[in-house]
Image (cartoon, coloured by chain):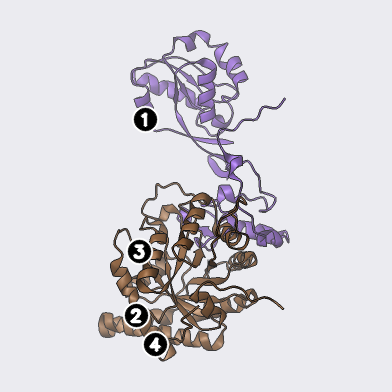
Chain colours: A brown, B purple
Amino acid sequence: MVAEKPVYSLFMKNLRAGRFVYTGEAEPHKTTDISDLIESFKALKGYVIAINVTDNPTAYAYISSLVASYLIQRETGIEAIYQVTCRDRNRLAITSDLLGAYALGIRNVLALTGDHPCVGDNPQAKPVFDLDSTTLLYLIRRMVDEGVDLAGNKIEHPPKFHVGIAANPNADPIEPELLKIERKVNLGAEFIQTQCVYDIEVAKAFLKEAERWKIPVLIGITPFKSVGMMKYMIQYVPGIKVPKEIQERIIEAKRRGGKQAVYEENIEIFTEMIKELKKTTRLAGCHMMAVGFEWIVPKIIERVEGGRPSYIEAL
Amino acid sequence: MIITEPKPEEEIKGYLEGFNKIFIVGCGSCATKCETGGEEQVKAMAETLRSWGKDVTGWAVPEECCDYRFLRRDVIRPHKEALEAADAVLVMACGSGVQAVAEVTGKLVVPALNTVFIGVTERLRNFHERCRACGDCLLFYTGGICPVARCAKGLLNGPCGGQANGKCEATQWQTDCAWVLIYERLKEQGRLDLFLKPRLPKDWSAWSRPRERVWR
């Protein structure tokens, strides 16, 4: 008999129990005050089981994701998924941040490589990448499972995290991406959150591949705030494929009823998509990335679930 | 080979301000192949210096500028007087060459080139970076393609999310994703098990500066 794996977070508890979960995404900016961001996420309580907090996304130097994760978790009462990238810190800095994160009550970590500084707002920066997403995952596993750092030094009171990885179902070619994910699953990744997917066939194909990994997959959903944002995504985000039909629906909505109609159409499009994926695949949940218009997230979730999702609320 | 490129003339002019007598040293090896410090470029530089009103006391292109022995044989012995007369030595070689000249001659040196990378020559004037001298070669595991040199992030476990159609976002899609290349190569060789295997965190102490090897 296999002993039941320990659970340290509500996020993981719900996933293990097979509840369909939603996560949100908070992107704190170049500021010392994130109270507005916190306010906008308070409205998501009961809808999302956890909130990812980005770590200098697209290599922009923002308020620390560790500090923001702590504040968001404390103020909203929703668990943070602390995103850690390898671009800005070496293994020493990351080890100490992870120890600090556990001391601050953080229990979920998403291990990422991070975008290259050249796409960010300080392109002159020296890229670190002492670790990558795989070796970062390995570091976290060693900290949690063996109570040691990468060099094998013992940690007093080792941290207990659930560690996830990102995946890009849009990757072309897809085969090296799939092997890379498998590499990380073999090392002990516990969940996957994907980049945004718009083509349901791409999502289905990816979820089919993912079945063999036997860890929960949350598909990334990014509604379009505007026609301009959709066009930007198509042009600049590597590999994003938005089916013609969806593009036309958004453009037509704008023509028909302006901004409000675009929002309504988004709710329609993603409700249909999530319902279809829930029906036909083993999808574990959705990662809702609606940066700057978080209020749309509960609206989509309510339409899919016919109300609030039923989450287990206590560890 | 060490790939070099010329510094802007204005920068060199600035360095040479206040120095009138200049000796020029090129390099018969890498910088000759790069056409940045060969005889032709050294002669052209002498002309440029003269047009700035400088007195070129002499010039030499040693077989290799980074080797003390060639510097003694090809520069110091045949050009003793011209070298002594110079206020500064302008060196058209890589950073190792510039320092070797300073060490062997004891003169004030001025670099004329920027050292850019260790690379291969595809054809004339086409050079590509291939090695970062990391001190712990992993080419066996990566199908003979170095991710430390060729992946923009130097990742040991790629590809990352910044690749599309096998091209790299960090070079504005101008270069190949090293990890897609590695995947294709290993697949071709029937060795995808190597691709799947995680490469554990690198021991960067092999890369710590300064390095030297003195064999007896």
Q: Mark 3: give few (<14), some (14-19) or many (20+) Cα within 10 Å.
A: many
Disc 1 on helix, strand or loop? helix
* Distance between mark 4 and mark 2 Cα atoms: 10 Å
Answer yes or no: do the residues labelled 2 and 3 have beta carbons within 8 Å?
Answer: no
Camera-nearest label, 1 or 3: 3
- Per the model, the C-alpha gap separating discs 1 and 3 is 42 Å
Instruction: Left or right? Give the position of A40 relative to B191.
Output: left
What is the chain letter for disc 1? B
The first of marks 4 and 3 along the sequence is 3
Residue at which label 4 appears? A302
Point out the image quarter for the N terminus of chain B: top right
Q: Which mark is residue B11?
A: 1
| Label 1 to label 4: alpha-carbon separation | 65 Å
Callout 1: few (<14), some (14-19), or many (20+) C-alpha neighbours within 10 Å?
few
- Residue that badge 2 annotates: A296
Q: What chain letter is assigned to the residue under label 3? A: A
Where does residue B75 sit, x and y in percent of width and height?
55, 16
Q: Indicate which disc residue A138 carries.
A: none
> What amino acid type should be assigned to the residue bearing mark 2?
Ile
Near-viewer residue (B2 or A130): A130
